[in-house]
Image (cartoon, helix red, strand yellow):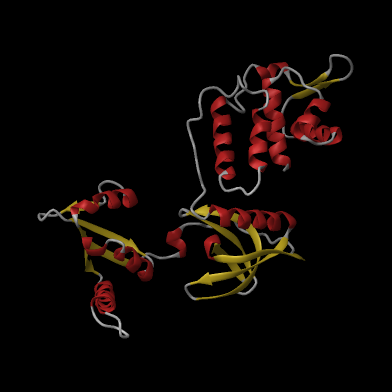
Amino acid sequence: MKIDRLIGILSVLLQEEKVTAPELAERFEVSRRTINRDIDDLLYAGIPIRTAQGTGGGISIADGYKIDRTLLTSKDMQMILAGLRSLDSVSGSSYYGQLMEKIQAGSSEFISGRDSILIDLSSWYKNTLAPKISTIQDAIENRHLLEFYYYAPSGEGKRTIEPYYIVFKWTSWYVYGWCLKRKDYRLFKLNRMDKVKETAESFSVRNVPVPDLSSELKFPRNIILKALFEPDMKWRLVEEFGPGCYEKQEDGRLLLIRDYADMDNLTMWMLTFGDKVEVIEPQDLRERLKTMAESMIKMYGGKKNGRN
């Protein structure tokens, strides 16, 4: 990608007194003509680059600019590399690893100290996520429609979208695009997608807005939960909501009051605590849990379909 190459070229120029176009072309595996165009782009962007022809010539940053190299500091480079490593953790190819090598080339003095930030965006589903992400990236870059089979709470079926963004949010990966079925922008969870395919059909790029990922706007929180948790569940409450999210009661139990958007998700979350929680409100949730508990007693505690 061109922007990645420009960052890499700029990094090299910040580290070395002078470099030639053929050297840059070999390092970034492009033609000398491409490097010349890249240098022009950096000049247009306001980077004070100078070139000299003949013996001893080459490409360098203007002398006055070398005094203050604050465009990319060592900390900046560490952040860039941490970001690239995080993408590499879900990449199905070696692209980001190769890009890191290009940026790091000749910059040992510039990138000082040990890596202090390590980000792993992979999951138990890495083997299935990486091919999906790669296919979606290709479809976005090629402006091709994306087809897939989708499993949603409202039902399942085939979807076709104009893909615009790959999103990591709420510990999960999504694709954001214009859904031809719904005639609107939608966010699709990759783990619910199957048979993901880049089609050969192109689409005209819309003036797509940056997706608003605020869960409060998309899912209004109008369900107020009041629940009492056993003391040994404190670690889970702190992990999910932070210290101070509960009020300790006289009997030692922990009172949690939170607002939620979806009753089904809230019900499933409550079930993960088993008998370690008592729901006080809302009453509808208490009734749901009671009905489910009665059904489980019938399933596991008595005869059913001839089984003990």
- Apparent side of residue 256 relative to residue 123 in the rendered image (left or right): left
Looking at the image, the residue that sits furthest to the right is 54
- Where 67 falls versus 150 (above or below)? above
The quarter of the picture where the C terminus appears is bottom left
> How many callouts does the rendering have?
0
User: Can I make out residue 222 in this image?
Assistant: no
Which residue occupies the foreground of this view, 183 or 269?
Answer: 269
Can you name the residue that lies furthest to the bottom here? 305
Q: Quadrant of the N terminus?
A: top right
Question: In the image, is 178 to the left or to the right of 241?
Answer: right
Q: Position of residue 76 (x, y in %)?
A: 56, 30
Residues 303 and 57: in front is 303
Asked whether residue 271 is in view, the answer is: yes
Name the residue rendered at 76%, 19% in the picture.
18
What residue is drawn where x is 34% and y is 52%?
240
Q: Where in the figure is residue 78, as x and y percent of width and height?
A: 55, 31
Question: In which image quadrant can residue 20 be found?
Answer: top right
Q: Is residue 87 left or right of residue 51?
A: left
What is the quadrant of residue 138 in the picture? bottom right
Residue closer to the observer: 174 or 51: 174
- The correct choice, above or below, for 161 with respect to 96 in the image is below
Residue farthest to the top, as pictured: 56
* Quadrant assignment, res 156: bottom right
Identify the residue at image location x=22%, y=66%. Answer: 279
